[in-house]
Image (cartoon, rainbow, N blue to C red):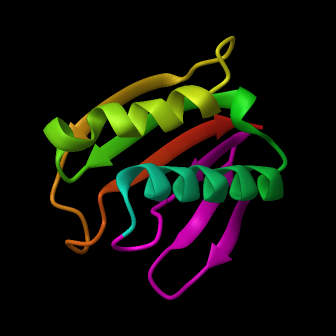
């Protein structure tokens, strides 16, 4: 049985879990009330930090799930930030959907899975 490593565990969840050479991140968000571009930048910075702590980086992304509170209003602005961040030669499988997020002040939440 493989070991499981938890990064930044809390009473309800861990920010990342490593198992069998794969890193699973919890949903990352930015500051409540900021613009979708600012929230996207902050979420991606958190992803970079957690991936580094796990021993990998964004070039090893496998999948990405992006949730937007208002896809019609915010899809283009989120994508502008995403496109400048994601490695063009190593893009993950990705899907984007609309959802009611944990608080009305959140505009975007990003979940990634990466290989070590």
Q: Nearer the viewer, residue 105 or 67?
A: 105
Q: Residue at x 41, y 31 (%)?
A: 79
Q: Nearer the viewer, residue 33 or 89?
A: 33
Residue 47 in the figure: left or right of residue 80: right
Quick check: is 29 in the magenta stretch?
yes
- Residue positioned most to the bottom: 11
Quick check: is 106 in the magenta stretch?
no
Q: Residue at x 58, y 19 (%)?
A: 91
Quarter of image, res 8:
bottom right
The quadrant of the rendering that contains the C terminus is: top right
- Residue positioned most to the right: 55
Residue 89: x, y in percent? 69, 11
Residue 46 visible? The answer is yes
- Residue positioned most to the top: 89
Residue 104: x, y in percent? 19, 72
Quarter of image, res 74:
top left
- Is residue 27 positioned above or below 103 on the image? above
Residue 103: x, y in percent? 24, 75
Q: Residue at x 81, y 59 (%)?
A: 53
- Is residue 15 positioned above or below 55 on the image? below
Residue 40 in the figure: left or right of residue 18: left
Q: Which residues are magenta?
A: 4-33
Q: Nearer the viewer, residue 19 or 25?
A: 25
- Is residue 24 positioned above or below 39 on the image? above
Residue 25 visible? The answer is no
- Is residue 66 positioned above or below 12 on the image? above
Residue 71: x, y in percent? 19, 40
Q: Residue at x 74, y 57 (%)?
A: 49
Q: How many marks?
A: 0
């Amino acid at each position: 049985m493989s070991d499981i490593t938890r990064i930044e565990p809390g009473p309800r969840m861990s920010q990342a879990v490593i198992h069998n050479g794969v890193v699973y991140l919890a949903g990352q968000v930015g500051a409540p009330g900021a613009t979708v571009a600012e929230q996207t930048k902050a979420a991606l910075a958190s992803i970079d930090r957690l991936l580094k702590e796990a021993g990998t980086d964004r070039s090893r992304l496998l999948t990405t799930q992006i949730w937007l509170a208002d896809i019609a209003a915010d899809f283009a602005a989120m994508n502008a930030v995403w496109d400048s961040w994601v490695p063009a030669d190593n893009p993950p499988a990705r899907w984007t959907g609309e959802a009611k997020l944990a608080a009305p002040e959140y505009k975007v939440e990003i979940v990634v899975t990466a290989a070590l």
